[in-house]
Image (spheres, rainbow, N blue to C red):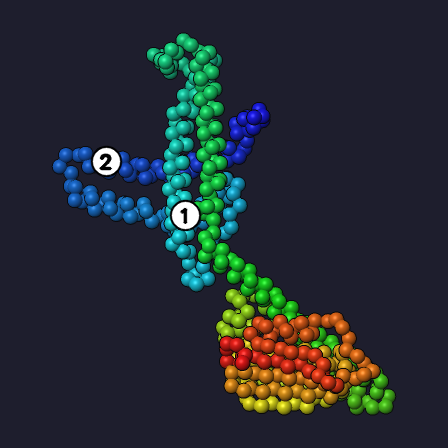
Amino acid sequence: MRVGAVVRPLVSGATYRQGVHLLLGGVLLLPYVLVAVLFVRMFTVPDAPYGLLLLVLALAVVIGVVPPFLRGTRALEIAAARALLGVALPDPAVTAESGRETWETRLRAALWFAVHLVAGGVVALLILIPLVMGVTFVVQWFGIAGGSLDGLRIGPLDEHDTGWLSLLGVATLAGVLYAVAGLGALAAVMAPVLLGPSPAERIAALEARAARLAERNRLARELHDSIGHALTVTMLQASAALHLLDTDPEFARGALRAIEETGRAATEDLDRVLGMLREGERADELGRQRAGARAGGAPRHGLGDLDRLVAHSRGTGVEVDTEIEGSVDGLPALVSQEGYRIIQESLTNVLRHAGPVPVALRVAVAGPTLMIEVSNPVAASRPRREGGRGLEGIRERVTLLGGTMTAGPDGARWRVSVRLPALGGEAS
């Protein structure tokens, strides 16, 4: 064993910080000791009102037992363990189901509180008796202990054996420091076990992290679909206006108006998404949408706005033949929004990969299923380009809602077919 490992507990700052933490437990234990001594003395008084004393004792026990189970007590213990024991503990968490700490967590925290008090009492005794004795034995060598050792006898030693008493004092001081270091190390090991998150809290933390990741993915899809569609439409409109500016000024003016409207709508979508980012975390992807229509949080576009989306696409030269079966007004808000974004991204993909070609769009609500089908001819002179996240984004939306999707060539046409559960559950 190296000398450094033996000496380190005596000179390490961690030993003294851990000693302070344990001593805090002794401070917390002091009121309990005083109350216990007080009741012992009262019960030893002759002719004392024992019935009243028992009632007061029961009340005192209840008051003394409550603090270890309080959430604030656990939070304070966690903060103290971080600062003084050097233990990395997460902030207190609550379960998603009840919004409160579980009884298992409270029991473990109460057990830690009791261990802290007992260890603090031990450290307090070490300071009051062995430490004081050790200091006294050491300073008597310099003749400043006065007559405090008169009549002292420890085994073969008495007050005249100043040298041996000084060595005993040094050994006592070292023993106290080793004891404090050992108790502090044990406390550092036990703190994560008793103050750390319970399995339910770990699950709640994982669910919260998954919700944050889902929200980031959703916002990324929102920006990709909205801004990507707006940029594609704007580029095509600008290109058409540039080529027809001299020969067809009226068409050019209409294209410029469409560019202005598309840019304004994209800016509104961007502001809404950024506003949602500033609002902070959401419970989860579906829960946020089902919480009801709220300012900045409700879907801005749904299948009820399909005419507007089709009009934008027609302004770029894409003729969209729309067929709607059933009513889309009764669809859940989330399904309506995601259906709109799926169609928007599909039309954007047509513009990017096939150009201004005729598109057949079919939307059907059949019982518990929403069906969306977008098809367009694949021009031989303009093969479909690889890359982009269009189909991937659509597939993510479909998977989120528990639907199914197929996409690929169907003869001379490219066809995207989506089935979504319109009333919850899985798409049939």
User: Which residue is denoted by mark 2 in the rendering?
Assistant: 40
337 left or right of 290 in image: right
- The quadrant in which residue 161 appears is top left
**First of labels 1, 2 by sequence position:** 2
Residue at the spot 36% in from the left edge and 13% down from the top edge: 155
Residue at the spot 47% in from the left edge and 32% down from the top edge: 182
Check disc 2 and give the amino acid type.
Val
**C-alpha separation, residue under disc 1 versus residue under disc 2:** 29 Å
Name the residue at the top extreme. Answer: 160
- Say if residue 267 shows up in the picture: no
- Whether 60 is drawn above or below 401: the answer is above
Check disc 1 and give the amino acid type.
Ala
Residue at the spot 70% in from the left edge and 79% down from the top edge: 408
Residue at the spot 62% in from the left edge and 77% down from the top edge: 405
Crowd rating for badge 1 (residues with CA inside 10 Å; few <14, some 14–19, many 20+): many
User: Which residue is denoted by mark 1 in the rendering?
Assistant: 109
246 or 10, which is in the foreground?
10
- Whether 183 is drawn above or below 138: the answer is below
- Whether 181 is drawn above or below 110: the answer is above
Name the residue at the front extreme. Answer: 411
In the drawing, what numbered circle is on residue 262?
none
Residue 27 location in percent, x, y? 39, 37
